[in-house]
Amino acid sequence: MLDSNIKSQLKTYFERIVQPIVLTASLNDSPAAGEMLELLNEVAEQSDKITIKTDGNATNKPSFTVSKAGEAARITFAGLPMGHEMTSFILAILQVSGYPPKVEDEVIAQIKGITQKLKFQTFISLSCHNCPDVVQALNLMAALNSNIEHEMIDGALYQELVDAHQIMAVPTVILNEESFGQGRMGIEEIIVKLNANNPAEDMAKFNAKDKYDVLIVGGGPAGAAAAIYAARKGIRTGVVAERFGGQVLDTMAIENFISVQETDGPKLAMALEQHVKSYDVDIMNLQRASALRHSDNGIELELANGAVLKSKSVIISTGARWREMNVPGETEYRNKGVAYCPHCDGPLFKGKRVAVIGGGNSGVEAAIDLAGLVSHVTLIEFDSALRADAILQKKLFSLPNVTVIKSALTKEVLGDGSKVSALKYEDRTTNEMHTIELEGIFVQIGLLPNTEWLKGTIDLSPRGEIMVDPKGETSVPGVFAAGDCSTAPYKQIIIAMGEGAKTALSAFDFLIRS
């Protein structure tokens, strides 16, 4: 199951094991159980500090636990941790053994200070690139605190649990049998959701910060590049980010980042954050900007928590998000059949009927990917022709379980109150209404800039993008913008980085001239 290269890597990793580890399997007679035992045996062969037991009696079979010898298990893998989750497995072994995690001491103290009993379950798919972040965060919390348990559940292997909990998107986290959250969450965000932080203390802490020379709003590629270029100038630099990495965290394969043949979004986001942290930059993660004010004394940035930060200049790089259909039922059934990431959520719809909204490259690629998983895909395109590349269209039309409907306007998402059951659309050529019975809808219709909070403060284009000149300057003196939230053409990672670097230089030029 594991090739010689992976085994060699595991031997190296497992040299860091501090205390002996026991992997306890709860098996049945399924093929998956056989594969699980084979994996565990191959992993255990790479270190004499790992022991395998097969006398587990877990409810979910096949599954296995990771525990320190002589201690009760708190981490469970209900599924085969391959693909993206192999790293989660390796880290669980190391961290349970006592190997120190790469987490700030303050965060570790907050985790160890949790006194309530918490039992987490995370539903994942092995193709989901956001799921490992959640799994690894909750595994670490369980490794550090005996009050916390965590179970990773592969939705493709436990379809009955998926149906019972009505899981329609991954990652989905259940806490003590109640819904806790969906989508990518880092360890700091999970702690905040558990109310481990005091909002009043946070607000006071931010208000007490000294004025910045440049304050960057947004932690994606543009914001990271701006922070690095600003910090290298030796000026006081801060970054406010709702989630560091931005939309890159939701990107799968990246093959056009010059000098790097292939990478993925989470890996690139981690590299960006590490690079920024290597400089003297004040990073304020998990914070949302709510208002911008300009006066003779500089610029004020108000946060959603009520705190106010002051700066001599500001760079806005808040990026963009998936554009929504804005039809009845979409909000009600988001993550209950309405999805935006086919890579992540596609496996949950195995054998079911789905629709893809959008005939550009993203939509057609999504339809092609889903066709290999689901029973049938219906692609809905508003225009009279698809806009995807010809080679993608050729592949799409070669698939027997795909139907393409053009000149169609999506009108409503229908459901039974708990999940999607159908999609209603209007034929734009005949004005006739049609209903398609299905279980899932994947929306792929482009991006929307994250600039609503700036309306009335700064000049925006009709599309909501921040209007900038060639130097990245906006209509407000001392305020610059870069990346997907601006009118700079071509929404690409490498272009966003260049724009971020340019605006940092422009901000520095503004500071020395004013």
Image (cartoon, grey):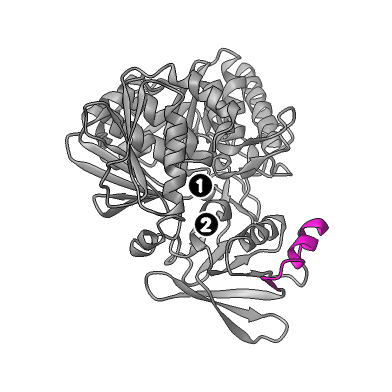
Q: Residue 444 at x, y = what percent?
A: 62, 59
Question: Which residue sits at x=50%, y=35%?
Answer: 294
Q: Is residue 437 or residue 280 the one in the foreground?
A: 437
- Give above or below for 323 relative to 263: below
- Name the amino acid, label 2: Pro
Assess disc 1: are there few (<14), some (14-19) or many (≥20) residues with their C-alpha within 10 Å of its C-alpha: many
Quarter assignment of residue 389: bottom right
Magenta run includes residue 48: no
- Give above or below for 440 relative to 346: below
Question: Which residue sits at x=57%, y=35%?
Answer: 220
Residue 146 in sight in this render: yes
Please tell me whether mark 2 sits on a helix, a strand or a loop: helix
Indicate left or right for 403 with 37 as reference.
right
Question: Which residue sits at x=31%, y=41%?
Answer: 150
Indicate left or right for 307 with 352 as reference.
left
Magenta region, residue range: 386-404
Residue 313 in sight in this render: no
Task: Work out which quarter of the rendered image holds the C terminus and state it.
Answer: top right
Magenta run includes residue 389: yes
Marks 1,2: beta carbons within 8 A = yes
